[in-house]
Structure formats: C-alpha cells, structure tokens
C-alpha cells in the first residue's frame, strides 16, 4: 500500500489480497512488490517492474498459491517496529517522511510481511477467493488486475 493514500478507503479483504499477490509475485519472480496499486472493492490492480507479460501457467500458479493461503486460514497480525530495525527487512522507497520512527508491519502467517498503514482482515478465510481477471505488459510495466470472491 502507498502510505500517501487514504487507508480508510481500502476494503480490508481486497487490501489483504493485494498483500498476498505482492508476496507471491516477489517469491516467484524476485522483482519486489508492486510500485503502484489501485485497490477497490470490486476489482483492483497492481503494477510491477517487469520484462514481459505472465503466461497462463504462471497466472494459474499465482492464483493457486494465493487461494491455498486463503483456504489455510492464516492469521493476519500487526506489530510495530522501530525505523532502524525495519530498515534491515523492508524497503523504504514508498515510505513518506512523515511515517515517523515507529512503523506498522502486517504479517500474513509466515507467508508475507510488509510495512503498511491500511486496514486488513484478521484471517485469510475472510477474503473468500482470489482470481486474476487480466494482465498486460507495456513499457516495462506488468499490470495485474484481480478480484476476490466474498466468503460464503
């Protein structure tokens, strides 16, 4: 999440799904988290520095990994860390100066951990399901558009 955006406008299940997508993309491709995201209740998108579009097999693998985490009912926790300690683990590229000396860290089980100021669910089961609705590649940017299904 971009700290400059108003976290009150984020829908917690979708915002937590964004964390899962970012964690999965970083684990699979080792290119870091999205540099830009637009998170809405109905559909969202993340942009990544990349060199191509995703294959259909990669899309399925991403969806399968994220849905497995959702189904496994991982706990979503927040903790706070001093800026100096956080610098050992996290990039501050998107962190605004006004973030302060104590930073909020969101963990999704052992699957993902990042700095964030937005609202989240307390368990991945609250997300329901995840699917990529489209991808596109242009000028070094991979855009991934996704939706979630409400739990039944």
Image (cartoon, helix red, strand yellow):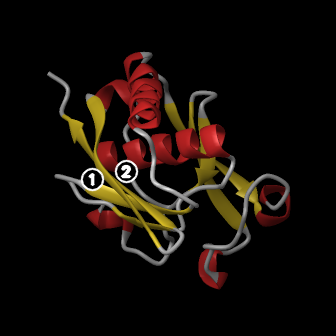
Is the residue 130 above or below the residue 29 in the image?
above
Q: Going 63% across and 73% down the picture, which residue do you hit?
A: 95
Q: Going 38% across and 65% down the picture, which residue do you hit?
A: 7
Q: Going 78% across and 57% down the picture, which residue do you hit?
A: 86
Closer to the camera in the image, 6 or 59: 59
Residue 150, given in percent of the width and then of the height, sits at 18, 33
Closer to the camera in the image, 52 or 26: 52
Is the residue 46 above or below the residue 94 in the image?
above
* Residue of label 1: 11
Residue 106, given in percent of the width and then of the height, sits at 57, 46
Instruction: Classify mark 2: helix, strand or loop.
Output: helix
Instruction: Classify mark 1: helix, strand or loop.
Output: loop
Which image quarter: residue 137?
bottom left
Crowd band around label 1 with a 10 angstrom C-alpha radius: few (<14), some (14–19), many (20+) = some
For the image shown, how many numbered marks are present on the structure?
Answer: 2
Crowd band around label 2 with a 10 angstrom C-alpha radius: few (<14), some (14–19), many (20+) = many
Residue 31, given in percent of the width and then of the height, sits at 66, 54
Closer to the camera in the image, 26 or 19: 26
User: Does the residue at mark 1 contact the one at mark 2 (Cβ under 8 Å)?
Assistant: yes
62 sits to left or right of 98: left
- Name the residue furthest top: 72
* Residue of label 2: 15
Residue 1, given in percent of the width and then of the height, sits at 48, 62
Q: Quadrant of the C terminus?
A: top left
67 sits to left or right of 23: left
């Amino acid at each position: 999440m971009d700290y400059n955006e108003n976290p009150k406008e984020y829908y917690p299940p979708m915002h937590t799904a964004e964390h899962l997508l970012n964690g999965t993309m970083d684990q699979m491709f080792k290119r870091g988290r999205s540099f830009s995201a637009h998170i809405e209740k109905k559909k969202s998108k993340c942009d990544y520095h990349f060199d191509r579009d995703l294959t259909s097999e990669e899309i399925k693998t991403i969806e399968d990994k994220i849905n497995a985490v959702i189904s496994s009912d991982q706990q979503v926790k927040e903790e706070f860390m001093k800026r100096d300690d956080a610098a050992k683990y996290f990039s501050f590229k998107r962190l605004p100066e006004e973030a302060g000396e104590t930073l909020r860290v969101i963990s999704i089980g052992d699957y993902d951990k990042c700095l964030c100021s937005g609202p989240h669910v307390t368990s991945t089961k609250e997300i329901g399901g995840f699917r990529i609705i489209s991808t596109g590649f242009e000028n070094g940017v991979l855009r991934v558009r996704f939706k979630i299904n409400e739990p039944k």
